[in-house]
Amino acid sequence: MMTSEEVAQRIHDHRWRQGQLLPVACHAEVSQHLSLAPLADNDAVIVISQSCDLVNGDLSEEPFAEILLAHPLPGSADGNYMYLRNPRRLHFHLQINGQRRAYMAWIWDRYRLPRKFFAQWPPDDTRGLLGQDEQDVLVSWLAARYERTALPDELQRRLSSIRDRLKKSVKPLKEVSALFLECSDQEFSANEVYRLRVKLVMPKKYYDQPDRRQAVEQLKVRLTVALEQCSGITLEEEPELLSELEFSLHDARIWRRWTDFDYLSYQDHAAHQAPYPGER
C-alpha cells in the first residue's frame, strides 16, 4: 500500500490538473466504487477538484478528489444550457481525438473518489475540455450553485408582472454569457421606484465578430422595451453590451449577476417555498 507521500508524488508525476478526464479504462472501477450503473466509453469523468488540492501531500487533509460525470449529447449543444444560463444543467464541449463534441452535465452528478485513483491512473490523453474557456465556464457553473443573487422580494414581484416577456427576451440571447444588474437591495414601498442599470456580457471571441455582436444588439431591444414597460421600475439608461474582457473585477464587485433566468425566482410560492420567512 502506498504512503500518503507516494500517492501525492504519483499524482504529481501523472501531472493531474483540474478539468482533466479519467481514462475510459477505469470507468468500470469508478462505476463499481460509486455503486453506479456502468459508465459508457463515451461518458466523461471530469476532475473538478482544484489542482493544488489534487497534489496535496497529506492524504488525511485531502483524502478525496471531486469529479463530475458528463454524457454526450445526441446533437449540438443548446444555448439555453450553455454558460451559466441554467443552474442545474450545463452544455459544453470536449475535444475527443481532435474532434469537438457536445456534452451535458447535471449538477447532481458530482461525486468524490479516493485520491489513490489518480495515483493509479494517468489523465486521458485523447479527451479533454475544449480549452481554458470551457474549464472556466464549468468551474463558474459549479460555483454559481451557491452564489446566485437574491434580489429584493418587492423587485421580484414587480418583475414577475413581465415574467413571460422577460423570458422571451432573454431566451434568444444564447451568446450572452451573463447579465448584470445595478439596483438597490432594499425592500421598497409600493410608491417607490426601483432604478435599474443592466449590462449584457459576451465572450470576447463572439463580441469581436461584428455580425454576432450586432445580432445581440438587435435582440437587446426587446429586453429594453420589456423593462421600460414594467410598473415600478425605471431604466437609468439603455442596457450596455460589452465583452468579458471589458467587464472588470471592479465591475463584478458592484454589479450583481442577474441569475433569475433559471426561472426559479419566478415560480409560484406553492412550488417554491422560501427556506426562511421573508426569503426567496
Image: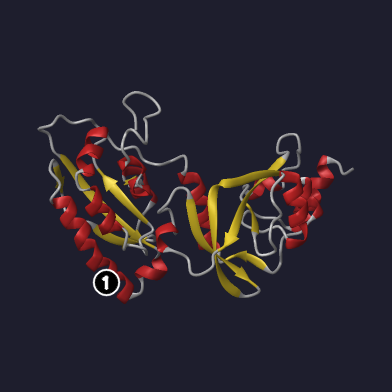
Residue 205 lies left or right of residue 34; in this view the side is left
Residue 34 lies left or right of residue 215; in this view the side is right
Position above or below: 192 against 69? above
Q: Extreme top residue here?
A: 277
Q: Extreme left residue here?
A: 191
Please name the residue that numbered disc 1 is placed on.
214
Residue at image location 28% in from the left, 71% down from the top: 215
User: Which quarter of the rendered picture does the C terminus lie within?
Assistant: top left
Is there any visible trace of residue 114 in the rendered image?
A: no
Count of picture labels: 1
Quarter assignment of residue 3: top right
Position above or below: 217 against 48? below
Image coords of residue 216 (percent x, y): 28, 66
What's under tag 1, amino acid-wise?
Answer: Gln
Residue at image location 17% in from the left, 43% down from the top: 195
Residue at image location 74% in from the left, 50% down from the top: 30
Residue at image location 63% in from the left, 47% down from the top: 49
Position above or below: 168 against 265? below
Image coords of residue 33 (percent x, y): 75, 45
Quarter assignment of residue 17: bottom right
Residue 188 lies left or right of residue 170; in this view the side is left
